[in-house]
Image (cartoon, rainbow, N blue to C red):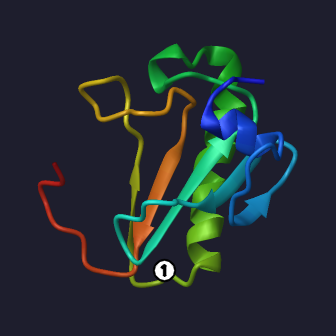
Amino acid sequence: MSDTVFGKIIRREIPADIVYEDDAVLAFKDINPQAPVHVLVIPKEPIPKLDEAAQKHQQLLGHLLLTAKEVAAKMELERGYRLVINNGDEGGQTVYHLHVHILGGRPMTWPPG
């Protein structure tokens, strides 16, 4: 297991407000929300960043996105939401364990950053 804060959440070494879990992924509320609804969906397999995902991760990456859709529905974001994957330092990634941000509960603006 990856030795990041997300790895520690997966291993239950630190608490999180978990909203969904299955054998492959975990979803929990962000502790520093940037929108009224801000949930992170992470694979349990530690992939440091999207650039390091390989062909062998194809099924897991698809599951990650479909889970994000299901969690957004569970969080009642039927009016819309934004999915964000930060990749690398200049992409704004701060935790090197691949994760998808689900942001919703308010109108999103563009450009985002």
Amino acid type assigned to the residue bearing label 1 in the image: Leu
Residue 11 versus residue 64: which sits nearer the camera?
A: 11
Q: Give the residue at mark 1.
A: 77
**Is 113 drawn above or below residue 95 in the view shown?**
below
Label 1: element kind: loop
Name the spot of residue 85 as percent of width and height, x first. Answer: 41, 41
Q: Residue furthest left?
A: 111
Residue 23 versus residue 1: which sits nearer the camera?
A: 1
Q: How many marks?
A: 1
Name the spot of residue 13 as percent of width and height, x first. Answer: 80, 43
Residue at image point 63% right, 67% down: 71
Q: Quadrant of residue 11?
A: top right
Residue 66 versus residue 31: which sits nearer the camera?
A: 31
Residue at image point 48% right, 80% down: 77
Q: Quadrant of residue 63?
A: top right
On screen, residue 24 versus residue 62, left or right, reads right
Q: Residue furthest right?
A: 23
Residue at image point 28% right, 31% down: 91
